[in-house]
Each structure stands twice: as C-alpha cells, then as structure tokens.
Amino acid sequence: DALIMAGVTHLEIAAFVSPTSVPSMAGAAEVVAEVGRPDGVTRTALVPNARGAEMALAAGVDELTVTISASAVYNRNNVHMTIDESVEQIGAICALASAANVPVDAVVSCAFGSPYEGDIAPATVSLLAERLRAQGATNLTLADTTGVATPRRIHDVLALTGVGVGLHLHETRGTGLVNAYAGMLAGVRRFDTSVGGLGGSPFAAGAAGNVATEELVALCDDLGVHTGLGVDLLIEAALLAEGLVGHPVPSRVAHVGPRSRRVEGN
C-alpha cells in the first residue's frame, strides 16, 4: 500500500517457487489475494516452471516473470537445466500466459558476467534474447545478478540487444546506480528496483540487493526525468520495510534523504 501511495504502478508481489528452496516465498497465492486488484497497478509474479505459471494465473496475477541465465553453469546450478531446456520451458510458460492474455517478462540473469565463467559475450546475451522473443516473451530484462556490470559492459551489451529492454541491477560492488545512469544515457527506460535496496539472489554468493527505488528516483528527479513517483513517500515505504525485516535497509537515501532535503538552522 505504501508503494502504491508513492505512485508505483508495477509491482512484483510474489514468487510461485518451491517453499522448500525459498522458504521466504511461501504463501504466494495468499499474498496475491491480500494485495487485491488496486486500480492502475500491474501485479507480477515470478514463476520457475509451467506448474508455477498455472498457479500464478489461477491466483489472478497480471504478468508473469521468468528467468534464464546467460551462464550455462549458473543456469544448471540454479534450475538444474541446460539453457536449451530452460528456453523450451519458457516457451511452455509463454503459451500458457498467451492463452490467458497475460504478458511475460523474461529476465536474462548473469547478462553482464558470471561468477563461474567470467564475462559473458554480448553476442551470447543478444542471441538468447532473440530466442526468448521467438518463444513468445513479451518483454526482456537484462539482470546483473552478481553485480559485476560496469558502464562499459552495459554499453557493449545494449549495443547488440537494443535499448528496448529493462535493466535489473544489483549493488554488490556499489555500481548499481552508475550502471542505471549508463543505461538511461543509452536509452533504457525500464528498471527493476527494490524498496530500500533489499534483495539479492539466494543462489549467488555475496549478492547484494537491487538498486533502491528511492535512490534511482532521487537521481531521476535531479536529472529532470519524470517518473511519477514521490521520493519522500518512497523513503517512508523503505523505512516501513526496514521495520518489517528487522534490520537496516541498504539504501543511503532512505536514511539521509535526497539532496533536495533541507535541514532547519538555528
């Protein structure tokens, strides 16, 4: 509710994954039911396979998110499949979603590098993106899963994939916000962020949270880029999240405020 009050219109609210593998994601259907159907808000859910897609569609979500890695080793360790097998599975999910008139966002993890293979060739990422589009993916998002991207890597990959993609960036090495800026300069207009900078893949050792929503919005405000989001209300949401998780959120802006904030003098 706090994020919607801040103007957020696209929310990933649940993941229909195995509660054994990711216990924190148990009760996905109940979460979707509790959120309800706020006007003007797209509610999306992560699904790992066709069964998860069926459950998410039955729960009434507005969009499905699927993931596949550009790293063969990471993909095998994460979902126990080859890349070809994952592409085929995503095709099956897209078919289910299409029948329900629900869009699918395909997220390519390790798009800028892998902890196992090092740099991933931009051509490899571009080819995988083309295969996912051919399977019926409505949107594509490139994820810096382990936080190894740099502005140069962002530029090189986008030069082949085009800028009609989203970026999902992490702050593992403190470069998430500068990479988002590089993406904006290149022409990307869609970014995954998280309230307070929470998050991090449970399958990527040492992975930090996503770029904080309030930090990216504060940057956009300073650049004159209209987002429709209120940074002060986002900070309130981040501090609410901080209380819920029981530890400080990583976001700096959540704690010190945007640069436009003034302190009353004596």
Image: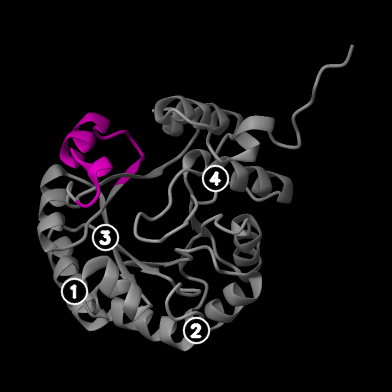
| Residue pointed to by mark 3 | 103
Which of pointers 2 and 1 lies earlier in the amino acid sequence? 1
Badge 4 density bin: few <14, some 14–19, many ≥20, Cα 10 Å: many
Q: CA distance from mark 2 to mark 1?
A: 23 Å
Asked where in the image residue 128 lies, by quadrant, the reply is bottom left
At which x and y percent is residue 158?
54, 77
Mark nearer the viewer, 4 or 1: 4
Please determine whether, in this image, residue 188 is positioned above or below residue 53: below
Element at label 4: loop
Magenta segment boundaries in residue numbering = 21-43
Please determine whether, in this image, residue 93 is positioned above or below residue 174: below
Which of pointers 2 and 3 lies earlier in the amino acid sequence? 3
At which x and y percent is residue 107?
36, 66
Badge 2 density bin: few <14, some 14–19, many ≥20, Cα 10 Å: many
Which of pointers 4 and 1 lies earlier in the amino acid sequence? 1
Amino acid, disc 3 = Pro
Amino acid, disc 4 = Ala
Element at label 1: helix
Residue 122 is tagged as 2
Magenta run includes residue 25: yes
Q: CA distance from mark 1 to mark 3?
A: 13 Å
| Residue pointed to by mark 1 | 91
Please tell me which residue is depicted at 24% across the width and 32% down the height of the picture.
36
Look at the numbered discs 4 and 1 and tell me whether their residues touch, using CB distance below 8 Å. Answer: no
Q: Is residue 149 left or right of residue 194?
A: right
Q: Is residue 144 left or right of residue 186?
A: left
